[in-house]
């Protein structure tokens, strides 16, 4: 009986690993295709709809994208917005989440209701634009950071994680004379690195993908993040009008090749950061959902 169970378990593991490996390879194929197509020549793309290994490599699409300093400047802008925005969002989220995790906070239920309410109902584009304008943040990088500095979803996950920590730690710290800020920054945050890394990744990806708000609030093209510039490059490569860009003097390479190269340029920076946070990702997301 034990031998039969061992054989059945072995067969299950073989089938399971085989299916998971096939699924993993299928999910990787689109990424490989995009990267390979960005290095492919026009002639090969015209004859092949799906490329995994180019027969002839070319850097024409990347040379076209980086033909001016606009992309490099916009990359630096996006990196700055992502770094500052993630720091501001995590600071505000940690402060608010820690307060809401305290059961003795006066009005805690009302504040939580207002937070959840914003997940279901939002002001809309025009009221938000008017608020940003009245605050004097038009054509400022802060217009891409302040309006969405705190995500209700991320805040609740972080609050649940803080709430799952043993209460005895805070009580011991208070006996030793530690203040609330000292408890947060010396005890709670160091013990919450998995959740903080997870939420930081969420915020960083959101700031890196900033596109629509940049079009709404930034009138100066020199302040545009990389997502807006890359979209303009795709428009120009498609043969459409391209306003306010030095790339209009260049001859566009194949439309499809440029699109693939744009995807690579916009995705690789985030992919380079993700492996360093991967070990915290699953643990932080799950632990933050244990308690409500």
Image: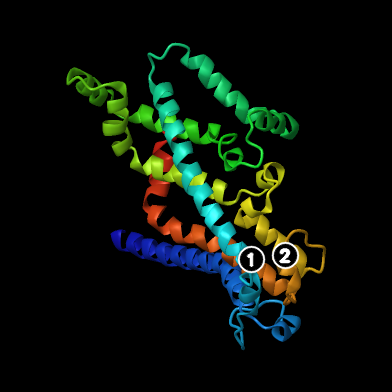
Q: For residue 64, say whether it is visible.
A: yes
Q: How is the image coloured?
A: rainbow
Quadrant where the N terminus sits is bottom left
Name the residue: 66% across, 46% down: 214
Viewer-nearest residue: 288 or 200: 200
Secondary structure beneath dot 2 equals helix
Q: Where is residue 126 in the image (x, y as percent from the top left)?
A: 75, 32
Residue positioned most to the left: 176
| Position of 170 relative to 256 (above/below) | above
Q: Can residue 291 be seen in this view?
A: no
Q: Say above or below: 178 vs 41.
A: above
Q: Mark 1 points at which residue?
A: 262
- Looking at the rendered structure, the secondary structure element under dot 1 is helix
> Horizontal and vertical percent for residue 204?
50, 48
Question: Residue lying farthest right?
Answer: 240
Looking at the rendering, which quadrant does residue 5 occupy? Answer: bottom left
Of callouts 1 and 2, the N-terminal one = 2
């Amino acid at each position: 009986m034990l031998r039969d169970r061992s054989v059945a378990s072995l067969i299950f593991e073989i089938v399971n690993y085989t299916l998971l490996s096939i699924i993993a390879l299928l999910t990787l194929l689109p990424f490989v295709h995009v990267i390979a197509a960005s290095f492919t020549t026009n002639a090969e793309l015209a004859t092949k709809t799906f490329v995994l290994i180019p027969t002839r490599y070319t850097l024409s699409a990347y040379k076209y994208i980086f033909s001016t300093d606009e992309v490099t400047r916009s990359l630096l802008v996006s990196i700055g917005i992502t770094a500052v925005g993630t720091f501001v969002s995590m600071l505000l989220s940690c402060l608010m989440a820690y307060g809401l995790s305290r059961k003795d906070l006066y009005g805690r239920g009302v504040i939580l209701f207002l937070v959840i309410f914003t997940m279901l109902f939002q002001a809309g584009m025009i009221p938000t634009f008017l608020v940003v304008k009245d605050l004097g943040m038009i054509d400022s990088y802060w217009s891409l950071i302040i309006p969405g500095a705190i995500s209700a979803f991320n805040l609740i996950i972080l609050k649940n994680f803080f709430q799952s920590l043993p209460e005895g730690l805070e009580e011991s710290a208070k006996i030793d004379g530690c203040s609330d800020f000292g408890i947060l920054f010396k005890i709670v945050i160091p013990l919450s690195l998995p959740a903080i890394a997870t939420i930081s990744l969420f915020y960083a990806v959101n700031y890196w993908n900033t596109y629509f708000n940049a079009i709404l609030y930034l009138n100066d093209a020199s302040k545009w993040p990389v997502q807006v510039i890359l979209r303009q490059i795709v428009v120009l490569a498609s043969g459409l009008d391209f306003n306010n860009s030095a790339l209009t003097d260049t001859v566009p390479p194949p439309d499809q090749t440029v699109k693939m190269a744009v995807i690579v340029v916009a995705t690789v920076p985030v992919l380079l950061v993700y492996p360093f946070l991967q070990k915290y990702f699953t643990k932080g997301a799950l632990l933050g959902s244990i308690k409500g």
